[in-house]
Image: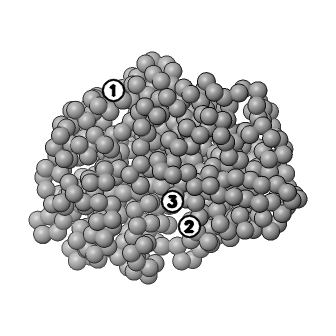
Amino acid sequence: MKNKFRTALALAAAGALTLTGCSDPGTGTDSSGPVDWPAQDADLSGTTLTIWAAQNSNTVPDSVIAGFEELTGAEVEVVTIPDPYEQGVQTKVATGDKPDLAFWQPTASQLTALNASQNLQPLDDAPWLDSYKPELRDITGILDDTRYAALITTPAVEGVYYNKEVFAANGITETLTDWDSFLQTARDLKDDGVTPFYEMAADRWGTQWWVQVQLADAAADGLWDRVNANEEKFTDPTIQGAIETYQGLIEEGLFNEDIKTATFEDQGAALLAGDAAMAVQVNSFFGQLQSLADTAELDQKIGFFPISPSGNVGTFIPDQSNALVAFKTGDADREAAARQLLSYWLGDGYGDFVNAQQTVSLQTGVETPADVPEALLAVSDSLADSVGSMQALAIANPDLYIFLADMIQGTKTPTEVAEATQAQFEELAKAQGAEGF
């Protein structure tokens, strides 16, 4: 989890350039025109397909693979790429080692990191697209007007997980509707002896959510477009101000006293136990809660609402477990078989998949399982009005969370956090050849 949202500067910069230099533009499917999509049940006897997966996604395909192998006669192998997954995949692809399919974060920056136009099959004419719920069809997976990623589960959303029992015990009966009421409630809880917020700065990666939810309105107003064009910087008032607000809330004593040493596991246990009222987190946090309690207990204790300066606007951040990409391998038959597997996954196999994963359905014609926890349904409901995160909309993703963790540990000021993030962003953007840098 620590590496899940990290883009290492050296590897990302070198990886983007290396992938460009090592790719053979004459190999694979021509992305300039449509491709054929085989029938889901076409015979694939004697065909072996490989899927690359991370350690936290390598069992996700199990139900799909079982059904597809029985239907088609194909063999599908899942290969686990050790963490840090993204860097490992980029390194392999740069040397010419490609799977048929891979789990991949379907953001523009991560598709760029794979040099999508040279290495990935276009999925623009995929037969399942009209099955998606309208608000999810084009939410992610697209680079330069070409679709390269197939969304299989709902993207994560940055928002507030809260303990319902703590809220009820302190007379909080309605969803907090904007940033001011959110913070006033936290201050009231603190006055009553309750720890309002829990943060896990020892594991670092979650610290960035506090800054990013404050940027939701600005993101909707084109913040990341301006940052991408070098017209606005992390050191300018909008992002710098969000960093300073975060530090101010910590200094105000609204977080757990052990913030410097607390871990992701501590955060989940604390919220479930009612030792804190709220945590700003993403979907993987709920996965941690599910390892600690069953659905009945979670429905009783844990709720979710999105938050932004002006209201309840979520910030979505798709990760590698949410989507798949299909590679150009130079073998037309295997490329077609990979497309066939995607068609089955998001076609006849999708109902079994969402039931096996106990996850929210992306499709209008496939019902969400009845025992999916209420908090996950609330996360899914927030997607329609959500805006993209830095990971979703920026052309490069600097290590903001590391610098914020340094701030919490006392080794960086808010100004130094913004300066370090901006400097790294510029280096990554230059390495990609982005205009304006």
Q: Residue 246's mark?
A: none
Q: Which of marks 2 and 1 is in front?
A: 1
Residue count near mark 3 (Cα–Cα under 10 Å), binned few <14, some 14–19, many ≥20: some
Identify which residue is drawn at 78% across, 45% down: 335
Question: Is residue 297 at least partly visible in the picture?
Answer: yes
Q: Which of marks 3 and 1 is in front?
A: 3
Which of marks 1 and 3 precedes in the sequence? 3
Report the residue marked by disc 3.
56
Q: Which of marks 3 and 2 is in front?
A: 3
Query: For numbered disc 2, what is the local secondary structure?
Result: loop
Report the residue marked by disc 1.
423
Question: x, y (%) of residue 172?
Answer: 26, 70
Q: Distance between the residues labelled 3 and 1?
A: 31 Å
Which of marks 1 and 2 precedes in the sequence? 2
Q: Note whether 137 is above or below 95 in the view shown.
A: below
Is the Cβ of the residue at disc 3 closer than 8 Å to that at disc 2?
no
Question: Is residue 220 at least partly visible in the picture?
Answer: no
Residue 358 shown left or right of residue 341 in the figure: left
Q: How far apart are marks 2 and 1 (CA)?
A: 39 Å
Identify which residue is drawn at 45% across, 18% down: 436
Q: Give, as a three-letter code, the residue at label 1.
A: Ala
Query: For numbered disc 3, what is the local secondary structure?
Result: loop
Q: Distance between the residues labelled 3 and 2?
A: 15 Å
